Image (cartoon, grey):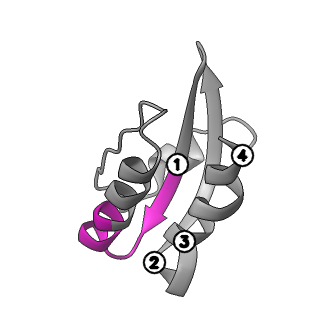
Amino acid sequence: MQNIEATDVLDLERGGLAVLVGVALKNGIKDFIFYTSDPKEFLVRAAAIRDSHIEFKLGCEVAKDKKWSHYLDFPGTAA
């Protein structure tokens, strides 16, 4: 998991594709919350990461959030 956090997250952010805005741990599941300028390319890169780490149950979801409401509702952020 440390390799994913240290290296693969950087791959998702490379070239300004996405920005990591939060990480949450709940019931043993770690969620990384990104905002991306290109959801299709983000999913391509995320799938490559998932496929290279079959030892983990990795998944990815994409949702529109033009007002950054997910980020603003995240603990420790302010509007």
Q: Which label was assigned to residue 17?
A: 2
Left or right: 22, with 36 as reference point: right
The three-letter amino acid code for the residue at tag 4 is Gln
Is label 4 in contact with label 1 (beta carbons under 8 Å)?
Answer: no
- Front residue of 63/50: it is 50
Q: Could you tell me the amino acid type at mark 1? A: Ile
Q: Nearer the viewer, mark 3 or mark 2?
A: 3
Image coordinates for residue 72, horizontal then vertical, percent: 58, 47
Q: What residue lies at 36% left-to-right and 50% top-to-bottom?
A: 51
Question: Of the residues under marks 2 and 1, which one precedes in the sequence?
Answer: 2
The picture places residue 23, in percent across and down from the top left corner, at 64, 42
Marks 4 and 3, how far apart at CA = 14 Å
Residue numbers of the magenta segment: 33-44
Dot 4 or dot 3: first in sequence order is 4
Local packing at callout 3 (Cα closer than 10 Å; few below 14, some 14-19, many 20+) is some
Number of marks drawn = 4
Quarter placement of the N terminus:
top right
Q: Is residue 44 positioned above or below 71 on the image?
A: below
Disc number for residue 11:
3
Front disc: 4 or 1: 4
What is the three-letter code of the residue carrying label 2?
A: Leu
Can you identify the residue that label 4 sits on?
A: 2
The magenta stretch spans residue 13: no
Cβ atoms under marks 3 and 2 closer than 8 Å: no
Give the image quarter of residue 43.
bottom left
Q: Earlier in the sequence, mark 1 or mark 3?
A: 3
Query: Is 3 situated left or right of 40 in this image?
Result: right
Residue located at (55% from left, 45% from top): 32
